[in-house]
Amino acid sequence: MTTTSAGLAHGRSLASFVLLATLAGIGVGLAKVTTALYAISLQATPLQLGLIAAAQTAGLLLTSLPCGVLVERLGPLRLFVLGSLLAGALFQLVPLVPHPLYLLALTLLIGLCMPCRFVSLNTVFMQQLAQMGEARAGWFRGSQMIGLLLIGPTLAALLIDWRGPAGSWSLIGLAFVVPVLLAPRVLRSYPAQRKVAERLSLGAFGRQLGLLRHDAQLRNNCLLDFCVQAAAMFFAFFIVAITVRDYGWSAQQAAALLSGHGLAFIVALFFLGRRFGGRGQTSFASSLLLSAAALLALGLGQQAALLWAGGLLLGISLGMLQITTLSSYARQGLRLGHGRIAGLAALIGPAGSMTGCLLGGLLGESFGLQRLFLLFIPLLLAFLLVPLLRSHFPALSARRTSP
C-alpha cells in the first residue's frame, strides 16, 4: 500500500485533515438541528418526528458496509466527493414540498450518503495512524465532534434566525460541498484503488460481517464500541428529559450539562490518547472503572453537583474508551483491510446509538429513565471481568477465541 511521503504525520497535513473532519461535522450538526426545527414548523406529529430522527441513523446502517467495499475500489477521495455532492444536491430539494413525509424520505436518502464521507475519512486516518502514533487515535472523532456538537448547532441557530428553517437548506447544502475543495489535499494519501479490492456484492458484505465471527479481537472491540456508543447516546438523548422533568431544571441548565459532557468527551479524545491509546490493561481497566463510577452517579444521584460530576466523568471515561476502540480498529485494519474495518465501524457505532435510544423508549416507563444508567455498568465491567475469568479458566478462553 503506497502513501504520500509525509502523509498525516506531517503537521500541515494533519491540520488539514482535522479541518476537513471538522467541516464535515459542521455540516451534519447544521442538518440535524435544522431538520428537527423544520419538522416542527411543518407540524409533524410525534410519530413523524421519531421516524425522521430514526431515518438519519437508518441511512447510515444501510450503506456502511457497501461504503467499506467501495472505498477500496474507488478510493477515499472519489467516494468522499461523491457522497458530499449527492448530499448537497439533495438538501436543495428539501423545501420544494413542505410536508413531513417528504422530509422523511429525503432525510433517509441524505442519510445514505453520510457513510461515503465518514468511511472515507476514517479509512485514511486508520491507515496513517501507525505513522502518527496512537496518542492521536481520538483526533478524527474529536474533530468530528467539535463540528457536530459545538460549532454546527450554534451556526444552525444563527442561520435559522437569519433565514428561517425553510430558507436554510441551500446554505446547508453548500456546507456539504465546501469540504470537497479541501478533500484532494487530505485524502490523496490513500491509493485510488487497492489491488485486493472486492467487487460490490452480497458475498462481499457477508465476508465483511464474517470477520466478526472469525476474529475474536475485532469482535470484542466492536462490542466495546457498541456499548460506548449506546451509553453516550442514552445520556445525550435522555439527560435533558431526566433533569427537566424529574428535578425541575431549566432547559438552559440541562443544555449546559449536555454541552459540558460533550466538551469533556472531546477533550479526552484530543489530550488523553498518549495515556489510553495503547494496549495497557491498567489504562483500560481504569477507563472502565471510571465509566462505572460515572454511571452510578448518574443512575442514583439527585443533587445537581452529583449529576454534573457524573456527566463530566462519563464524557471523559467514554472518550478514553473510544480512544481504545479507535486504536484497536487501526491495528485490525492493518491485518484485515482499513476499508473493511472502517465500514464495520460505521455500522457498529450507529447501531449502538440506536440501541441506546431504544433502551430508554422501551424500558423507561417501567423502570424509570434515570435508573437505566445502572444497566450499562455490568455491560462495561464485563470487558474487565471476562478476561480475568478466562485467565483462570484456560479451557473457556480456548473455546471462546478459536474460530
Image: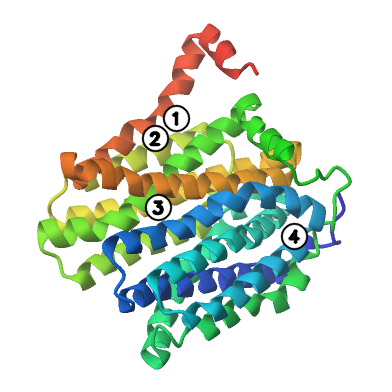
How far, Cα to Cα, is label 3 from label 4? Answer: 31 Å
Q: Earlier in the sequence, mark 4 or mark 2?
A: 4
Residue marked by disc 3: 316
Residue marked by disc 1: 383
Q: Amino acid at mark 4?
A: Pro
Hey, which quadrant is residue 43 in on the image?
Answer: bottom left
Residue plotted at (40% across, 52% down): 316
Q: Secondary structure at mark 2?
A: helix
Residue 314 percent coordinates (x, y): 34, 50
- Mark 3: give few (<14), some (14-19) or many (20+) Cα within 10 Å: many
How far, Cα to Cα, is label 1 from label 3? Answer: 18 Å
66 relative to 9, above or below: above
Q: Mark 1, mark 3: which one is toward the viewer?
A: 1
How far, Cα to Cα, is label 1 from label 4? Answer: 33 Å
Q: Is residue 282 left or right of residue 17?
A: left
The answer, for residue 64, to whether it is visible in the render is: yes
Q: Is residue 360 left or right of residue 56?
A: left
Residue plotted at (58% across, 74% down): 90
Q: Earlier in the sequence, mark 3 or mark 2?
A: 3
Residue plotted at (80% across, 61% down): 189
Residue marked by disc 2: 380
Q: Earlier in the sequence, mark 1 or mark 3?
A: 3
Q: Secondary structure at mark 4?
A: helix
206 relative to 132, above or below: above
Residue 39 percent coordinates (x, y): 36, 73
Residue marked by disc 4: 76
The answer, for residue 296, to whether it is visible in the render is: no
